[in-house]
Image (cartoon, rainbow, N blue to C red):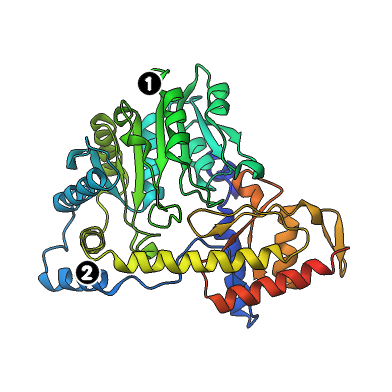
Amino acid sequence: MTSILSERIIQMEESATLAMAKKARELKSKGIDIISLSLGEPDFKTPKHIQQAAKDSIDEGKYFSYPPVAGYQDLREAIARKLKDENLIVEAKAENIVVSTGAKHSIANVFMCLLNEGDEVVIFSPYWVSYAEIIKLAGGVPVLIEGSLENNFKATADQLEAALTDKTKAVIYSSPCNPTGSVFSKEELEAIASVVKKRENLFVIADEIYELINFTGKHASIGAFPGMFERTITVNGFSKGYAMTGWRVGYICAPLFIAKACEKMQGQFTSGGTGIAQRAALAAISGDQSPSQEMEKAYLKRRDLVLKLIQDVPGFKTHVPEGAFYFFPEISNFFGKSANGFKVSDADDFCLYLLEKANVSLVTGAAFGAPNCVRISYAASEEELIEAMKRIKDACAILK
């Protein structure tokens, strides 16, 4: 019956992170003690004042009808204020903001509105798993520029310039980065901006969803640089920094014509995001920020813990992540080795081996454009992280 399905869905890759999480849940349901380090999901609860705002909005009874397609005006104004005050994107106004059902939805809107068949998008790689598939779904062609472990997995402005062609329509990166945790400095982004400004009608999609989990204390937004507001679509949301993954609220800040196009697209596909979730988002962005700051401190403590544990596993090579909550070690040392009848040929096999032999779920780096690596999420308790790394070390030790 698959022949009845469209080519676009047949050709689309399944999200590797969600696929591994699904396998882990299936094994857990059978009573197997799986430690899941595969999903990029905070293990914290949404802060109480955000929960209370949602409860209050229900009691008010004013948010049960269709919300405006681009989001409630007061939420859009609050987002614009935040971008002006904190990100120094001084041109940001409510009219530039479109609120969507998560940052993934925001990115999909942007590419559906920007790309024609055959347009190229340069992706800074390693990259978040959904970028390439969304680009292809919109008719575009992903073009990868690869950062190396030696350079903290950050591709350079020179690589970007070399990758540009007459068909290049956009550039996308994340900072802090999923999957590497790397953070682009202001100087690195200025160099990227200089390349972009040389070309007419070239746009940057800056994915800043991990902005509040940044251990450098120096988050920079490319949209704040001179001449870049009209070239930049800043993507952000509430899932990571506010532990609101299930609330599904993301947004863009974009030049007005792109914002209007995304609103038009959203009006046909989903309409506005859930009203109650938007009231919670307003409380998140306008209210007490200390819970997010405490979460960031906890993530930094976990990073330092896992760094020591990873460095104690022979065969793992890693850099020191500066944000988000991931490690992205290079593990090709284990390729070609076997244990208990299981041969590890690549990163996919390595993840399956650890799932089967160590009861720990990770995600293959192949899904992120780096086939010699794996992604480890440390959005888990310290106890789970210690036990997971012990299991990984023991399982790796018997590979010969």
Amino acid carrying label 1: it is: Asn
Q: What's the residue at 42%, 31% (across, down)?
A: 190
Residue closer to the observer: 376 or 12: 376
Q: Is 344 left or right of 213, judged from the image as shown?
A: right
Count of marks overlaid on the render: 2
In this view, 218 is above or below 280: above
Q: Which residue is mark 1?
A: 201
Tell me, for residue 125, which label it has, or none: none
Q: Is 91 left or right of 31, judged from the image as shown?
A: left
Amino acid carrying label 2: it is: Ala
In this view, 147 is above or below 45: above
* Residue 46, image x, y percentages: 34, 70
> Dot 1: within a 10 Å radius of its alpha carbon, few (fewer than 14), some, or many (20 or more) residues?
few
* Residue 40, image x, y percentages: 50, 60
Q: What's the residue at 30%, 44% (across, down)?
A: 87
In this view, 31 is above or below 310: below
* Residue 243, image x, y percentages: 38, 65
In this view, 156 is above or below 161: below
User: Do tag 1 and tag 2 residues touch (Cβ < 8 Å)?
Assistant: no
The answer to whether residue 34 of the structure is visible from this angle is no
* Residue 207, image x, y percentages: 42, 44
The answer to whether residue 385 of the structure is visible from this angle is yes
Indicate the secondary structure of the residue bearing disc 1: loop
Indicate the secondary structure of the residue bearing disc 2: helix
> Dot 2: within a 10 Å radius of its alpha carbon, few (fewer than 14), some, or many (20 or more) residues?
many
Q: What's the residue at 78%, 66% (across, down)?
A: 396
Q: CA distance from mark 1 to mark 2?
A: 41 Å
Q: Quadrant of the C terminus?
A: bottom right
Q: What's the residue at 46%, 49% (across, down)?
A: 176
First of labels 1, 2 by sequence position: 2
Q: Which residue is mark 2?
A: 54
